[in-house]
Image: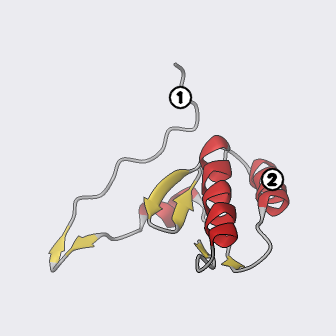
Amino acid sequence: MFDLPVMTKPERKAANAFRLDLLDMGFSRSQFSVYMRFCTSYKNAATYTQRVQRALPGGGSVTLMSFTDKQYERTLNFNGQKRLPKKSGQNQFDLF
């Protein structure tokens, strides 16, 4: 999750570059400033933490959170007052 300054042209450019870096690393956009990526292990998550840290812009706030598969499966989603059906779990190995 991030909240980056975008008041000046250089700030907007840095925020957009960070967003593009996340996409290049395989993150997907969940909300406007919330991106997610499935990691197969704690070690894999630590690798992406380092990659995100190297891509951080000069200002703003960035928060990284880790959830286990079971914790993520218990996520509840609503659209207005209507509860949405559970999303299918992420497969650890997707072959293309």
Residue drawn at 74 percent across, 54 percent down:
45
Q: Nearer the viewer, mark 2 or mark 1?
A: 2
Looking at this view, is 50 or 93 the one in front? 50
Sequence-first tag of 2 and 1: 2
Q: Label 2: how many residues lie within 10 Å, few (<14), some (14-19) or many (20+)?
A: some
Give the quarter of the image for residue 81.
bottom left
Residue drawn at 68 percent across, 50 percent down:
21
Say what amino acid the circle numbered 2 marks: Arg
Residue 83 on image: x %, y %: 19, 71
Secondary structure under tag 1 reads loop
Looking at this view, is 82 or 9 the one in front? 9
Residue 56 appears in the picture as rendered: yes
Q: Residue furthest front?
A: 9
For mark 1, what is the residue? 94
Residue 59 on image: x %, y %: 75, 78
Q: Quadrant of the N terminus?
A: bottom right
Label 2 and label 1: CA atoms lie apart by 22 Å
Q: Is residue 60 above or below residue 35?
A: below
Circles 2 and 1: CB atoms closer than 8 Å: no
Q: Residue furthest top?
A: 96
Secondary structure under tag 2 reads helix
| In the displayed structure image, the side of residue 91 where residue 12 appears, left or right | right
Q: Residue furthest left?
A: 82
Residue 66 appears in the picture as rendered: no
For mark 2, what is the residue? 51
Residue 50 on image: x %, y %: 84, 57
Looking at this view, is 30 or 15 the one in front? 15
Q: Label 1: how many residues lie within 10 Å, few (<14), some (14-19) or many (20+)?
A: few
| The disc label shown at residue 67, or none | none
